[in-house]
Image (spheres, grey):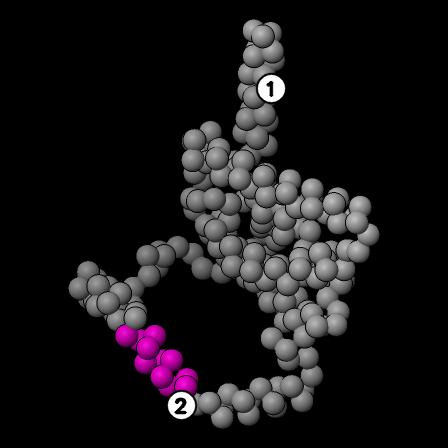
Amino acid sequence: YGVISWQDIKKRLLLLLGHWRSYIWMGLAAFVVVSPQLLMWRYATGHFIASPYHNVPGVGFESPRLFELLLGVNRGFFIWFPITFMAVGGFFFMQGAATPFRAPVIVLFVSYALFLSSFRLWQAAGGFGGRYAVDMVILTAFPLAALFNATKPRWAQCVLGVIAAGCILWSLFLMTLLYRREISFYGVDRAAIFDVFWWRKEALLHWLQCR
């Protein structure tokens, strides 16, 4: 972050070289922390590095499933985490102090999306939404903050707050459905979403009639 020109790259490299001792200590500390996991893998598999996905097909960049990854009902990033969709508009407001973050966030977000959508197992098996894409949520924090900061009229701030609250409630609602086993651990489709709301509509009408 903060690299927006070739001169910035030179400054960053000099900064890194000036703290090489710190990076050695960081590497040693990281090795100590991860060594129990490496020893466990060695004991269980005979190898220090083991991957449970070694039988899963890898990446196919010839046909990325970008639409399904971002907007698909089953695992769509913007469907399961809709507050991140608001952050897309925030890219246009990343100015001033946020300017150094704009280019890195856009490059990382696009690269991440293209890579994940090209992965053969892009659905990430079971879990809440596309769990491989969870790291993308962090990247949307910067443009989302810029969007909130650029919204000045009081009424616009209120509207934005209501939309944000609705997005958060939607994600919590989907999480509740998952924990209650009303939607599948392996995702949903349009029919499943319709059934969820249709059942609630019928239950609400029955409750009103009973009242």
Q: Position of residue 80 (x, y in %)?
A: 57, 44
Above or below, 104 against 131 in this view is: below
Q: Is residue 46 left or right of residue 148?
A: left
Image point (63%, 48%), residue name: 83
Mark 2 lies on a secondary structure that is helix
How many numbered markers are drawn? Answer: 2
Magenta run includes residue 24: yes
Query: Is 57 one of the magenta-colored residues?
Result: no
Is 149 rendered above or below residue 16? above
- Between 98 and 184, which is closer to the camera in this rendering? 98
| Viewport quadrant of the C terminus | top right
Direction from residue 119 to residue 52 in the image, left or right: left
State the residue lying farthest toward the left.
Answer: 43
In the picture shown, does residue 38 fall above or below 126?
below
Residue type at mark 1: give it: Lys
Left or right: where does residue 93 sit relative to residue 205?
right
- The residue under the point 66% across, 60% down is 145
Image quarter for residue 158? top right
Image coords of residue 149 (percent x, y): 72, 60
* Residue at screen point 38% across, 80% down: 26
Q: Main secondary structure of the magenta part?
A: helix
Callout 1: SS: helix
- The label nearer to you, 2 versus 1, is 2
User: Residue 21: which numbered mark, if any?
Assistant: 2
**Of label 2 and label 1, which has the lower sequence position?**
2
Which numbered dot is residue 201?
1
Specify start and end residues of the magenta stretch as a single range.
Answer: 21-32
